[in-house]
Image (cartoon, grey):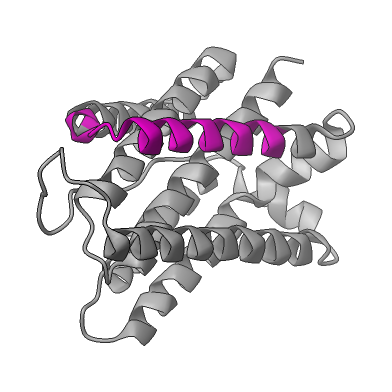
Amino acid sequence: MHNQRGTFSTRPQRRMAPATQAIDASRSAFVRRTYLHLAGAILAFAGIETALLNIPGIEKFAMSMTQGMTWLLVLGLFMGVAWGADRLARSTASVGLQYVGLGLFIIAEAVIFIPLLYAAATFGEAGVIRTAGLVTMATVCGLTTFTFMTKTNFSWLRGIVVVGSFAAIGTIIASIMFGFTLGVLFAGLMVLLAASIILYQTSALMYQWQPDQHVAAALGLFSSVMLMFYYVLYFLMARD
């Protein structure tokens, strides 16, 4: 059964401020709003995922998602929804549209996680999902703290992130088409890629995003946190 997923947009935002810029009161308020929205998105994801996994017959749906080329179709739909959600979250026409985009993306993440979380809950070691969550949050907190304490501008990671994302997507598509398993090494590399994206996006909170773009910024961080969580969990399960 294939349990791989792709990566998402990391394109820069509107304007680039100097790397030496201090975080003023307005920027600090923006950062707080962004992380509050990120926390809300994670809680919403957990609630939706719990509800989905308790639907009668979900095991058949979970297995059907990864049969043959179906997983490739699922990934294609997911990336399409993710692109549209990102565009809505960046909308300047309406704050409501921004929240619609964030909500759509949370739902899309919950659906794409169904096969892996079902497999982890059914066949994985006891507590493996909780362990993956704790490892993910500890890593994200460490990367975030380092970036804010050092005020490092990680915009130079953009090229690495873009190339790495395309390479990952290509490898995932090849694994689905030719039927080979990606395994622990690929999962480890994807965790490193997710860490790079988080560094890039955390830096963008300080130097790139505009103060009224907290919804879009939260969506970007949420996608990266979920990417890391996915492959940390996949790594823990694949090593058994």
Q: What's drawn in magenta, residue-wise?
A: 132-157
Q: Kindly indicate the quadrant of the structure image that contains residue 10.
A: top left
Q: In the image, 188: left or right of 213? A: right
> Is residue 134 shown above or below 183?
below
Q: Quadrant of the N terminus?
A: top right
Q: Quadrant of the C terminus?
A: top right
Figure label count: 0
**Residue 72 appears in the rendering:** no
**Residue 204 appears in the rendering:** yes
Percent across and percent down for residue 6 are 42, 40
Percent across and percent down for residue 139 are 56, 30
Residue at horizontal 85%, vertical 35%?
A: 127
The reply to whether the magenta stretch includes residue 143 is: yes
Residue at horizontal 35%, vertical 46%?
A: 8
Q: In the image, 35: left or right of 50? A: left
Please name the predominant secondary structure of the magenta segment in the image.
helix
Residue sitting nearer the eye, 87 or 59: 87
Q: In the image, 188: left or right of 135? A: left
Percent across and percent down for residue 183 are 58, 17
Residue at horizontal 28%, vertical 86%?
A: 94
Q: Kindly indicate the quadrant of the structure image that contains residue 135.
A: top right
Residue at horizontal 57%, vertical 52%?
A: 112
The reply to whether the magenta stretch includes residue 64 is: no
